[in-house]
Image (tube, helix red, strand yellow):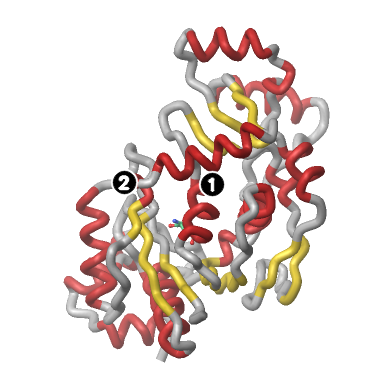
Amino acid sequence: MPPVFRFAPSPNGYLHLGHAYSALLNFERARESGGRFLLRIEDIDPTRCRPDYEQAIYEDLAWLGIAWEQPVRRQSQHIAEYQAALQRLQAMGLVYPSFESRAEIARLVAQRDADGAWPRDPDGAPLYPGAATTLSVVRRAELMAAGAPYALRLDMASATARAGRLTWDESGAGPSGVTGTVEARPEAWGDVILARKETPTSYHLSVVVDDALQGVTEVVRGQDLFHATSVHRLLQALLDLPAPAYRHHQLIRDAEGHKLSKSTQATGLRTLRATGVSPAEIRHRIGLV
Ligand code: GLU
């Protein structure tokens, strides 16, 4: 079976040099290995994703000389599949609803911090500090029936106990230079959100469902997603999905060493193209010759 690669941008802004690097790396590795290259549009968040950004993704990638298989999988069209996966986790008793607002969570975190530093996840966000696991079944049903906003969370302690020790095969270099067999540490993320009332799935859930469904064997993506792989391995194990091999590549940074942002014009592919920069110059700028 040929290896299967994918590039999976979210249409919530214009692509920048970092996306060009990731997309070209995937595309070229697929070509060199006689593999397949897929493009996936990760548009589960209707408040941030826009059709014109999606259109721009197609234009910018084609301009770079990248070709992908059709049809393109657009996550917004597959919500039922993510819900089916969520229901399997629910049936295992691994999911619970929490009802605190963002403000309430911030208040609880401040309280926990005052008692001693409350743990942060690998992205620097505080772990879920609430006590929603202790709500009675009746109370949960009442709040849901009253239309209260909620987040469905993974009960991390039960999930990791069920899945046992997990590793992944890393051929890139993680933030601390680790490569080879990497030990997954999903507990570092606490009770992650798998779905919300208004968005019935999440990045973590849709990405593992899709990678499996599309037969992705090689995940090549930025180092900023290195630690998220721990959660992905856990969900794959719980849902009996195969584990792809991972390669987390270095991030392209601006002159000050900051991560690129979709909102910065200067490093946006469209802006560069409009100012006469060629695809060959883009490759040169990101260190691909
Ligand atoms: N959609 C994610 C992003 O734009 C990438 C997901 C992935 O490669 O796993 O950052």
Tag 2: amino acid: Cys
Residue behind mark 2? 49
Question: Helix or strand or loop: what does disc 1 sit on?
Answer: helix
Q: Is residue 65 left or right of residue 146?
A: left
Image coordinates for residue 27, horizontal then vertical, percent: 40, 79
Disc 2 residue crowd, few under 14, some 14–19, many 20+, Cα 10 Å: some
Q: Which mark is residue 177?
A: none
Q: Which mark is residue 205?
A: 1
Closer to the N terminus: mark 1 or mark 2?
2
Residue pictured at 66% horizontal, 69% vertical: 174
Proximity of marks 1 and 2: CB atoms separated by less than 8 Å: no
Image coordinates for residue 58, horizontal then vertical, percent: 24, 66
Residue pictured at 18% horizontal, 74% vertical: 275
Question: Helix or strand or loop: what does disc 2 sit on?
Answer: loop
Q: CA distance from mark 1 to mark 2?
A: 18 Å
Image coordinates for residue 45, horizontal then vertical, percent: 38, 41
Residue 263 shows in this picture: no
